[in-house]
Structures are given as structure tokens and as C-alpha cells.
Image (tube, rainbow, N blue to C red):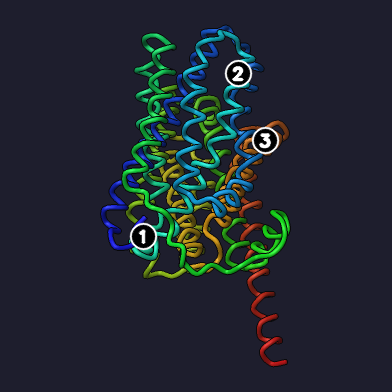
């Protein structure tokens, strides 16, 4: 990717990110409907859904180190070939076990694509401007949360074989399209060196305050997002007694608010600064959880949804800007950062289920507030400790 053509890069990259998100969202819908067509039980459906996430968690961290060694462009292309072939092969065996295995194998490929794009975007952030720090996730969310489900629903109206063929060809098109604008990384870009294996280097990365802070906050954002996505429809229908249409619309509102926040709040975050933005994000997420926990009407739940989305967008904008400024290897940073978000997503859904079992769905979002405040306190105390350590070192 050439620094001399930042505007050309950002336009092509945003198209690729939106296309990628739409393909992933489309695949989720088609896979779920195909599993139901095969007669999969709820347990089998859960296993199929979990397989892709399992594959992603397993290889997200190693993906960053592979990309640091071989380059994002080459790895992205090769990692797109796997889903292409696997989606074409899914209709050959009408069995839920094969479908689960195929999703696991696809999940092993996806981290290389995600981390490659994230690291490429971080490298270009200093050329295109930190105010655009949320554009990659915004484009991905636009595709995955809005365009993908619409396309997936349309594809599922016909043959499932056609649906998987179209999804496979989309991965192939993305692989070829990326070669048209995605140039090799700059070999002279200054990168701070790290010694040791993957775990040793990961610990060294987390020794940097801004990296640890970003990963902890991303983990919390991922967990809170998973909590919302998993339980908001149940809350709306069973507790607030809303219709299914109103309950589902809350998910759509969340997607729209997230996209608008990621694309539109960059300039505001730049002017406000890191600490003020984190504080605003904390205030919004607590207010959003209070509204979701206590709001009985649709308007209050919708407002809580918007506040939660804006809080997540603000935190992501700061995190991406921080990592874009870092002298550490962007591929390794991206692997660690994305792993934190995926880990949070898994933990949020599981922990939410446990909390809901003990205190009920009606109180779930209120019970989440102490966890948010404890995380904020942990980051603040860690920042103070690091600051006092630097003062002692300088004075010594």
C-alpha cells in the first residue's frame, strides 16, 4: 500500500471491508438456514455456530506473527482461497457434522484475513488521518450487520447450493480485488523489535501501557456487545412485552448507530483527547445499561441501544488511534487486539447466560454495570502505577 496514494487506498479499502463484512454476514444467515433445512437440533445448531468462533480464537494471535513474517497482502490472498474452496464444498455433503467441520476450517482462515486488514489499516492511519480511525470497523459493521443479512435472506429463498457458490465466489473476488490496490508493506517502516516466541512477545507487548489498556477495553467492549446481541431481543419481548418486530429493530438500531459513530466521531475524538474520550465512553455505557435495565418502553430501550453503540465507537476510535501511533509491529498488535475482542465476545455471552440464570434477564444489564466500573478502575489504577514508576525512575 502506497503512502503516496492515501485517498485511493482508503476508497478501495473501504469497499473491500464492506464487501468482506457483507460476505461474512451473508454466510452466517445462509449457514443457519441451511442447518435448519438439514434438520439440525438447537444443540447441533449451537455447535455449528461455535465452530467458526473456535477456529478464530485459536489462530488470531498466531496470525499476527505470520503476517509480520510474510506480509499482509500475501497472507490475505491465500487466506481467502480457503473459504472459497470450502464454501463450494459444503453442499457436496448434506450433513450437519460436515457443515460444522467446514465452519471450523473456515474459522481457521478468517483470522488471517481480519488481522491482515486491521494491520494494513493501522499502517495507513498516519497517512489518511487519525480522525478516520473507526472507518475500517464502520465499513465492516455496515456490511456484516446490515447488508449481509439482507443478501443472505435473499439468497436463501432459492437453492442453498447457489447460495454457497455465491459466497465462495465472493471470497475469490475479494482475493483478486485486493491485489489491484494492496501493495507490499514498506520495508523501511520503523518497528520496535521484540525477542522470544509468540507468548513471550505477547507479554512484552502487553507490558506497554497503551497496548494493555486498549486490549482490556476492547475485551470489555466485545463482551458488552455480545451481551447486548445475545439478550436484548429476549429482554424486549419477555420483559418489556414488545413485539418481535420492535425487538429485532433494536439490533438494527445498534448497527446503524455503531456505523454512524465510527464514521462520524473521529474529529470529535481528536479534539477531546484520549482520557476525555474514555470518560465520555464510560459515562455513555453506564447510562445505556441503566436505560436497558430499567426502560420498559421501546423509546427508552432504543435510546439505551444508541448510547451503548456510541460508547463502543468512542472507545474503538481511541484504541485504534493509539495503536496507529505505536512503533510496535502493527500485525502483532492487531492479532493481540482482535483476540481480546473475540475473547470478550465469547465471555460476554457465557457470563451473561450465567448472570441471567441467577438474577433474571430483567436485571442482567444493571448487573453488568459493576463489571464496567471495575474495568475502568483497573485501567485507571494501572495508569497511575505506571506514571508513578516513571517518576521514580526519572528521579532515581
Q: Tell me if 70 is positioned left or right of 182 in this view.
A: right
Q: Which residue matches tag 3?
A: 350
Q: Residue at x 42, y 34 (%)?
A: 144
**Sequence-wise first label, 3 or 2:** 2
Q: Earlier in the sequence, mark 3 or mark 1?
A: 1
Nearer mark to the viewer, of 3 and 2: 2
Q: Position of residue 151 (x, y in %)?
A: 35, 24
C-alpha separation, residue under disc 3 versus residue under disc 1 = 32 Å
Q: Secondary structure at mark 2?
A: helix
Looking at the image, tell me whether mark 1 or mark 2 is earlier in sequence order.
2
In front of the other: 285 or 13 = 13
Quadrant of the snapshot with the N terminus: bottom left
Q: CA distance from mark 3 to mark 2?
A: 16 Å
Residue at the image position 31 percent from the left and 44 percent from the top: 180
Residue 298 visible in this rendered orientation of the protein: no
Give the percent coordinates (x, y) of residue 123: 44, 60
Residue extending farthest to the bottom is 395
Front-most of 113 and 289?
113
Q: Is residue 249 above or below residue 255?
A: above
Residue 45, numbered label: 2
For disc 1, the marked residue is: 266
Q: Return the x and y of residue 136 as percentages of the image width and height.
A: 40, 49
Determine the secondary structure under disc 1.
helix
Q: Are marks 3 and 2 in contact (CB under 8 Å)?
A: no
Q: Position of residue 128 (x, y in %)?
A: 33, 61
Give whichever of 73, 229 is nearer the camera: 73
The alpha-carbon separation of the residues under discs 1 and 2 comes to 39 Å
Amino acid at each position: 500500500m502506497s503512502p503516496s496514494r492515501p485517498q485511493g487506498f482508503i476508497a478501495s479499502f473501504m469497499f473491500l471491508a464492506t464487501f468482506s463484512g457483507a460476505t461474512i454476514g451473508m454466510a452466517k444467515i445462509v449457514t443457519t438456514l441451511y442447518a435448519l433445512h438439514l434438520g439440525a437440533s438447537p444443540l447441533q445448531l449451537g455447535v455449528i455456530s461455535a465452530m467458526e468462533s473456535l477456529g478464530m480464537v485459536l489462530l488470531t494471535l498466531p496470525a499476527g506473527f505470520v503476517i509480520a513474517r510474510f506480509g499482509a497482502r500475501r497472507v490475505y490472498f491465500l487466506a481467502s482461497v480457503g473459504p472459497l474452496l470450502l464454501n463450494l464444498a459444503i453442499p457436496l455433503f448434506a450433513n450437519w457434522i460436515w457443515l460444522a467441520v467446514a465452519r471450523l476450517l473456515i474459522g481457521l482462515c478468517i483470522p488471517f484475513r481480519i488481522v491482515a486488514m486491521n494491520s494494513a489499516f493501522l499502517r495507513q492511519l498516519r497517512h489518511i488521518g487519525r480522525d478516520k480511525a473507526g472507518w475500517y470497523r464502520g465499513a465492516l459493521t455496515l456490511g456484516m450487520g446490515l447488508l449481509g443479512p439482507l443478501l443472505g435472506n435473499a439468497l436463501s429463498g432459492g437453492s442453498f447450493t447457489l447460495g454457497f457458490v455465491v459466497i465462495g465466489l465472493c471470497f475469490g473476488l475479494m482475493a483478486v480485488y485486493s491485489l489491484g490496490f494492496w501493495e507490499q508493506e514498506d520495508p523501511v517502516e520503523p518497528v520496535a523489535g521484540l525477542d522470544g516466541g509468540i507468548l513471550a512477545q505477547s507479554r512484552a507487548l502487553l507490558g506497554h501501557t497503551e497496548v494493555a489498556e486498549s486490549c482490556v477495553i476492547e475485551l470489555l467492549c466485545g463482551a458488552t456487545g455480545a451481551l447486548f446481541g445475545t439478550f436484548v431481543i429476549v429482554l424486549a419481548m419477555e420483559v418489556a412485552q414488545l413485539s418481535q418486530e420492535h425487538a429485532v429493530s433494536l439490533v438494527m438500531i445498534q448497527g446503524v448507530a455503531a456505523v454512524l459513530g465510527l464514521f462520524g466521531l473521529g474529529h470529535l475524538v481528536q479534539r477531546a483527547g484520549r482520557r476525555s474520550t474514555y470518560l465520555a465512553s464510560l459515562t455513555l455505557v453506564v447510562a445505556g445499561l441503566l436505560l436497558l435495565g430499567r426502560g420498559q418502553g421501546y423509546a427508552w430501550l432504543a435510546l439505551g441501544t444508541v448510547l451503548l453503540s456510541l460508547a463502543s465507537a468512542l472507545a474503538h476510535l481511541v484504541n485504534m488511534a493509539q495503536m496507529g501511533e505505536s512503533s510496535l509491529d502493527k500485525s502483532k498488535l492487531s492479532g493481540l487486539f482482535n483476540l481480546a475482542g473475540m475473547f470478550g465476545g465469547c465471555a460476554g455471552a457465557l457470563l451473561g447466560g450465567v448472570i441471567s440464570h441467577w438474577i433474571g434477564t430483567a436485571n442482567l444489564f444493571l448487573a453488568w454495570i459493576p463489571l464496567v466500573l471495575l474495568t475502568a478502575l483497573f485501567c485507571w489504577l494501572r495508569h497511575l502505577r505506571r506514571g508513578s514508576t516513571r517518576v521514580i525512575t526519572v528521579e532515581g
